[in-house]
């Protein structure tokens, strides 16, 4: 029983220091980093470019079929 309490105390101490290191920025946490504003903007631009290119190809193909 005494060993269990000692192990529990060491575990709590270990958890405390891990959290302190993460909070101080000295150790990375296992959580995913929050998405940045630039990342979301770049993703939006990439999606818009993809949709625009797809629509352009459809229009070009339609024009070629009608007039070529």
Image: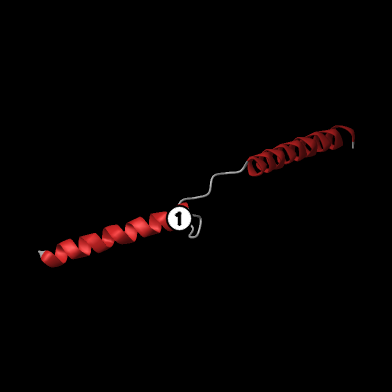
**Left/right of residue 28 with respect to residue 62 in the rendered view:** left
The single residue placed furthest to the left in the displayed view is 1
Q: Which of the two residues, 1 or 68, is positioned nearer the viewer here?
A: 1
Q: Residue at x 85, y 33 (%)?
A: 63
Q: Which residue is mark 1?
A: 22
Left/right of residue 63 with respect to residue 17 in the rendered view:
right
Residue 18 on image: x %, y %: 39, 59
Where residue 4 appears, as percent x and y from the top left, is 15, 63
Which residue shows up at 53% across the image and 49% down it? 33
Q: Is residue 32 visible?
A: yes
Number of dots carrying numbers:
1
The N terminus lies in quadrant:
bottom left
Residue 53 position by quadrant: top right
Q: Residue furthest right?
A: 68
Closest to the observer: 51 or 43? Answer: 43
Instruction: From the viewer's side, name the closer residue of 48 and 56.
Output: 48
Q: Quadrant of residue 5?
A: bottom left
**Counting other residues with Cα less than 10 Å from the Cα at mark 1, is it few (<14), some (14-19), or many (20 or more)?**
few
Say what secondary structure mark 1 lies in: helix
Residue 6 percent location from the top left of the image: 19, 64
Give the residue at x 71% y 37%.
48
Quadrant occupied by the C terminus: top right
Residue 52 in which image quadrant: top right
């Amino acid at each position: 029983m005494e060993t269990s309490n000692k192990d529990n105390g060491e575990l709590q101490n270990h958890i405390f220091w891990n959290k302190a290191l993460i909070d101080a920025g000295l150790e990375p946490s296992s959580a995913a980093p929050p998405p940045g504003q630039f990342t979301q903007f770049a993703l939006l631009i990439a999606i818009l470019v993809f949709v625009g290119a797809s629509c352009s190809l459809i229009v070009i193909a339609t024009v070629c079929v009608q007039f070529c």
